[in-house]
Amino acid sequence: MHVNRVAAALIIALLALFFLTAGYYLASESSSQNAYWTIDISPTSGRDLVTPNGTIRVQLNQSGITVTADATGINGFGGWNFDGQAVVNANSTIFVPKQKAYSNHTLEAQFIVGTPPLAYSSKLTGIGIPQFDGIFNASQSSTIQANLTLTSMSAEKITVPIEDLRMTYYNATVDYKRWVNNDYNYSTLQAESLNYSFSLNQLTLEPNMSNSTILTINVAQNATPGQYFFFIDFGDFVGTDFSYSSSINLGIVIETGTIDYWLDNTLDYQMVNGQWQTVNTATNSTSPGLQMPINARNDGISTASFDLIISFTNAFYGGSSAIPRIMIAWDKINDTSANYSFNLSPHQTQSINVSFAIDNNMNEFRIGLSFESNQSLLAEPSQKGSQPWEVVYRQLYFHESADNSYAPGLIS
């Protein structure tokens, strides 16, 4: 009887152990089914893609995870880094096997950033102004014009915005080897020294064709002389598989723009055999009639266009004769005055003779040459130095002498 009770207790104990072991096994199996590991997947470029991406939990009952990298446009796939280590000989699609439960990992897709194809070329050519290697010479109160041409190198039609002319450098001393200076507020100096405009603010380029816009720069009368450097910025545009932006540089050397003008004070007028003659006392030469040359010189480094007015008192304007290859225009204002228009290249001097007649009822006459100050140019002073003779003459006074001739008297 005692033996039977011991056997029964043993059987009960074995059954309890069996159920306990089965329960533990079932709990362990359930825990294994819910376990996971974590992987953070990302690309090196914001434009490129990985699938899937972000932080992903991978269940431990899965064999792993497959990830694909997709390079966009002109970029290329460069490889994988798993937990900061390069994966050898990996393709753009990679399989990451399962890791330890609750472990954390990183997977980064590496991309090679491609260089965009050259979409267009650019060229800047001065219109009627001297230039050297993209450096334009200009004077105060002058106007610069340049032709900006873009030539497409793309197989598709593109539209390029022309954004602005942006100053990046100034130096008071001209030095073509020095283009770095941080001592100035460039935007303020640019606004004070010039304004600009483009005839077209965007250029549409057909495949492999060219288009142009004209850049006009008006240099202020009080522009600070010196060496300027600018960028012409082109805005972004998006092609089929790339975006593109560019710029072209432009240098300008601005100097004080001045002109000079004067009358000839070496001329006498004599009556010979009833005919007036002009006598040049400096050369002892004579010419028929009454003539007074107008002289003008451009002392700036850019082309200057301006008007001079010649006027007579007690004498009458008689016109001028055209001179071949000399581009001077004139218009009669009234019987005693006329306007003469000059267009002079840098450091160029031109002269033209003006005919006139003396009022026979008077024994004196005056000739004056004037420059209107509203022409946005600076005129040099007539007094050139400290000595009285260091002067050019813009007003001449002639008085009749006893032998029926006139010579300059009061001059200024």
Image (cartoon, helix red, strand yellow):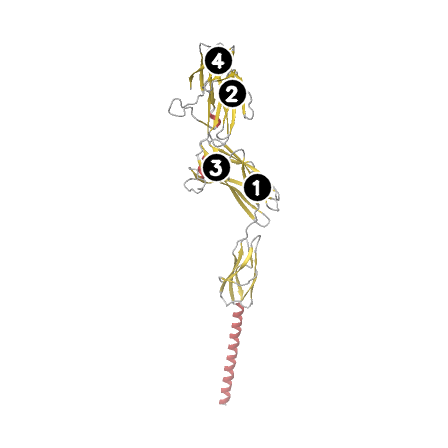
- Of circles 4 and 1, which is in front? 4
Lateral position of residue 241 relative to residue 377, left or right: right
- Distance (Cα) linking label 1 and label 2: 47 Å
Indicate whether 397 appears above or below 37.
Answer: above
| Residue at the outermost front position | 284
Q: Give whichever of discs 4 and 1 has the lower sequence position.
A: 1
Q: Give whichever of discs 4 and 2 has the lower sequence position.
A: 4
Residue pointed to by mark 2:
353
Q: Give whichever of discs 2 and 3 has the lower sequence position.
A: 3
Place of residue 77 in the rendered image (x, y in percent of width and height, measured from the top left): 55, 57
Indicate whether 391 appears above or below 91.
Answer: above
- Of circles 3 and 4, which is in front? 4
- Distance (Cα) linking label 3 and label 1: 21 Å
Packing grade of label 2 (10 A; few <14, some 14-19, many >=20) is some
Q: Secondary structure at mark 2?
A: strand
Q: Amino acid at mark 2?
A: Asn
- Of circles 2 and 3, which is in front? 2
Packing grade of label 4 (10 A; few <14, some 14-19, many >=20) is many
Q: Are marks 2 and 3 in contact (CB under 8 Å)?
A: no
Place of residue 376 in the rendered image (x, y in percent of width and height, measured from the top left): 47, 28
Q: Secondary structure at mark 4?
A: strand
Residue pointed to by mark 1:
150
- Distance (Cα) linking label 3 and label 4: 52 Å
Q: Amino acid at mark 1?
A: Leu
The disc label shown at residue 252, or none: 3
Q: Are marks 3 and 4 in contact (CB under 8 Å)?
A: no
Q: Amino acid at mark 3?
A: Ile
Q: Give whichever of discs 1 and 2 has the lower sequence position.
A: 1
The disc label shown at residue 270, or none: 4
Q: Give whichever of discs 3 and 1 has the lower sequence position.
A: 1
